[in-house]
Image (cartoon, helix red, strand yellow):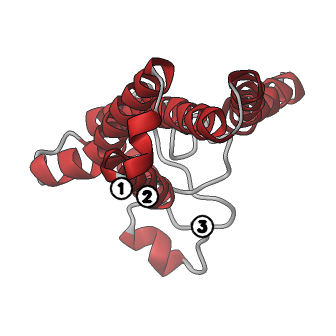
Amino acid sequence: MATTGSGQRARRGARPGPGPATRTGAAGDGTRAGGDGSDGRDESRAERIDRELMELLNELRIALPGVQFLFAFLLVVPFQQATSRATDFQRDVYFVTLIAAVVATGLLIAPAAQHRALFRQHDKEDLLRRSNRNAFLGLVVLALAIVSAVVLVVDFLFALPQALVTGGLVAVLLGWLWVGSPAVQRARDRRGGA
């Protein structure tokens, strides 16, 4: 959050004056707000937690329509006449996909529900930690649901070998985009900052 005048800094409790504002930490170390100050933001710990929680909730707004669409599709499938010719394997994959979609929906909605249920309880840092964990687990289970759905559809329309290869490729793609690429970026950032 950029500051444009000493009046804004004073209202937020920072010391007025030239340059970035600092707040004295518990140890009196004069570190920048937000802990180590490495992100260059001028915000208190409470402001950082509020911002990170809102960012997380906004990110979940992107993921939720996808899982809801998949879940709705899965609810309709059993009522189609073509399911009468499904194999035992396809029924098993369908069950895994359905349960994964239900669990992913629960995990991805949990942060918003907990935020509402714990409104004004003054424990946002714990809520943020728990919500971040739920969101990550929700995305992992959503990836499982997507891969399983792909395996189910490809096996139903084509053959099991094609379904397994396609499901494997989708799993690798999602694993790279959602986990691998960010992990590589974090490792680069750590090496560059050390």
Q: Image height check: is 63 above or below 182? A: below
Q: Nearer the viewer, mark 1 or mark 3?
A: 1
Could you tell me the amino acid type at mark 3?
Gly
Q: How far is disc 1 from disc 3 in space, using C-alphas?
A: 56 Å
* Residue denoted by label 1: 72
Q: Earlier in the sequence, mark 2 or mark 3?
A: 3
Could you tell me the amino acid type at mark 2?
Phe
Could you tell me the amino acid type at mark 1?
Ala
Residue 73 location, quadrant: bottom left
Q: Earlier in the sequence, mark 1 or mark 3?
A: 3
* Residue denoted by label 2: 69
Q: Closer to the camera, 161 or 147?
A: 161
Q: Image height check: is 84 above or below 172? A: below
x and y, in percent, of residue 36 in the image: 60, 34
- SS label for mark 3: loop
* Residue denoted by label 3: 17
x and y, in percent, of residue 69 in the image: 43, 58
Residue at horizontal 57 percent and vertical 66 percent from the top: 1
| Callout 1 touching callout 2 (CB < 8 Å) | yes
